[in-house]
Image: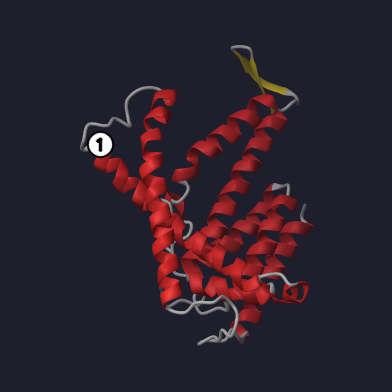
Amino acid sequence: MVDFIIGQYVKRDSFVHKLDPRTKIIILVFFCISIFVVNNFWGYVFLFALIVLWTIFSKTNPILLLRGTKPVFVLILITVIFNLFLTQGRTVVKFLGLTITDKGIILSLFLVIRLLLLIFSTSLLTLSTSPIEITDALEELLKPLKKLKFPVHEISMMMSIALRFIPTIYEETDKIMKAQMSRGADFESGGFVKKAKSLLPLLIPLFISAFKRADELAIAMEARCYRGSEGRTKLKKLQYSTNDYISFLVAAILIALAVMVR
């Protein structure tokens, strides 16, 4: 839980932190699309090059990104196992009635790379962009939908709050687990089914805590006369700079190269 970094923001004086949040979100959207378009080794090399550049210019510790993959390690492992043994192709290894094919190995490898790229890119966005900046950027990007009576500001605020409270909920879960362990609860011994059952007592206090935090947040927002987008002004208006255009160009070149080599 300590290693869960999606939703966390680390304030630094870096090139990426100073970019317009709309720039980072647009690059992320096209980056995620390209992840599922690319289907060969060299394409992923170009995408990883973009991740490396983003990491360097945001002054993010690479160890922090690698630690962020630990909470989803089980998901990655299950994905690899299913695709490794259930994909048809030329047999490479066969044991205990299970067959590993050449296509299964390639598909499993590509899926792991795709999951890692998704985790790294989304983590870098939240680590280098504050929740308020994400809210403002989403509201600006979705502004055309206002003509269709779409509640752009409210939806953006909801997404930002949800993103902000992901690490908070994990911290609360960790506190509840430690409190129950100090009273004799066992979350470590036994098989997978027993461990899953031992987590059920966490749900009730966790839900109560989550609803309590939501109620406190709603009261705090009402106390500050929050009424949605009606009559709302911004202290800091978003504005593109030269660095944003340079970032667009570099990202576009790398993403285009990754797509072209497929």
Residue 67 location, x and y as percent? 42, 50
Residue 133 location, x and y as percent? 53, 75
Tell me which corner region of the image, top left, top right, bottom left or bottom right, holds residue 125.
bottom right
From the viewer's side, name the closer residue of 145 and 71.
145
From the viewer's side, name the closer residue of 40 and 211.
211
10 Å crowding of disc 1: few (<14), some (14-19), many (20+): few
Residue 229 visible, this angle: yes
Residue sitting at x 66%, y 61%: 31
Residue sitting at x 75%, y 24%: 90
Q: Relative to residue 151, is residue 98 depicted above or below? A: above
Q: Relative to residue 92, is residue 220 depicted above or below? A: below
Residue 261 location, x and y as percent? 77, 55
From the viewer's side, name the closer residue of 189 and 230.
230
Q: How is the image coloured?
A: secondary structure
Tell me which corner region of the image, top left, top right, bottom left or bottom right, holds residue 219.
bottom left
Q: Relative to residue 194, is residue 1 depicted above or below? A: below
Residue sitting at x 56%, y 32%: 78
Residue 204 location, x and y as percent? 39, 41
Q: Which residue is mark 1?
A: 181
Circle 1: residue type: Met
Residue 1 visible, this angle: no
Describe residue 128's horizontal placement relative to residue 216 as left or right.
right
Describe residue 93's horizontal placement relative to residue 186 as left or right.
right
Q: Secondary structure at mark 1?
A: helix
Describe residue 241's horizontal placement relative to residue 63 as left or right.
right
Going by the picture, which residue comes out furthest to the top? Answer: 96
